[in-house]
Image (tube, grey):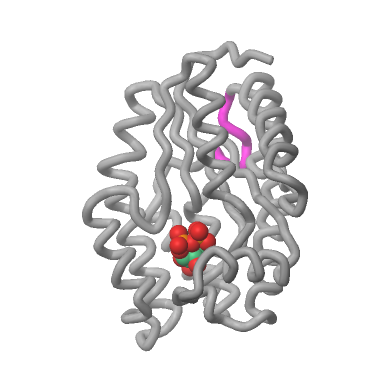
Amino acid sequence: MTIQNTRGRFITLEGGEGAGKSTQAARLESRLRARGFEAVLTREPGGSPLAEQIRSAILSGAIAPLGPAAEAVMFSAARIDHLRHTIRPALDSGKWVICDRFSDSTRAYQGALGNLDPQFLRELERVTVGPTRPDLTIVIDVPAELGLARARARSAFADRFEAEGLAFHEALRNAFLDIAVDEPRRCAVVDGAGDADAVSDTIWRIVCERLVESPEPSPEKKAAP
Ligand code: TYD
């Protein structure tokens, strides 16, 4: 299968802890490069020097006492820098950007954790992201227990969000699935419980289908606040 159009595209991978996003993001980058596309692999929080500093502050738990609204603002500050210094320059030069987490993580994590006013989150996203919305978002879905078990097997140290309880991670899973239901043209849900090769083949098929057959931005993207 080949991808014919040459414009840079913005692909995000989303999901809860231990969904396998980072592995799949790296595989997608390799597949794009193997077909001659210039691809930039990046992640959030982080992806630019200032955003990496903000990442350290958030994941250390230092911001948590200020509450979920403050965390949402911090993730958004990191995103503004990431967009400015990494994502937009790459897209503007025709590269494909693959981003491991983006604004849906703020909607899901800070929304699920903090019971935040959805209008506040929408406005924050609008101001933060502006017109640079993903062309495609792959939501990798795994049961919360499986994802947490994978995350714990990977590292004995639980970061800020891995340390939250199972109910939080179940709410998180539902929040990502709800986003995909609300924006079906932008999002595709992939079952991440299977082996990495099968997941990566599924993602590749979706990328080829979605980004070849509907090269124009989705209506949700145009209509987004
Ligand atoms: P990271 O180590 O990158 O985790 P993962 O491999 O699961 O992506 O840590 C990022 C953590 O930050 C992760 O628990 C999700 C959380 N997060 C938010 O809560 N809001 C956000 O907007 C983003 C981008 C991440």
The x and y percentages for residue 183 are: 67, 48
Q: Is residue 132 left or right of residue 5?
A: left
* Residue shown at 48% from the left, 22% from the top: 33
Q: Residue furthest bottom?
A: 65
The x and y percentages for residue 124 are: 42, 62
Quarter occupied by residue 215: top right
Q: Is residue 22 left or right of residue 192?
A: left
Q: Is residue 18 magenta?
A: no
Q: Is residue 7 above or below residue 188?
A: above
* Residue shown at 53% from the left, 15% from the top: 35
Q: Which residues are magenta?
A: 216-222
- Residue 43 visible? The answer is yes
Q: Is residue 157 above or below residue 46?
A: below
Q: Is residue 162 left or right of residue 83?
A: right
Total numbered labels: 0
Quarter occupied by residue 143: bottom right
* Residue shown at 63% from the left, 13% from the top: 2
Q: Is residue 211 left or right of residue 130?
A: right
The x and y percentages for residue 194 are: 77, 49
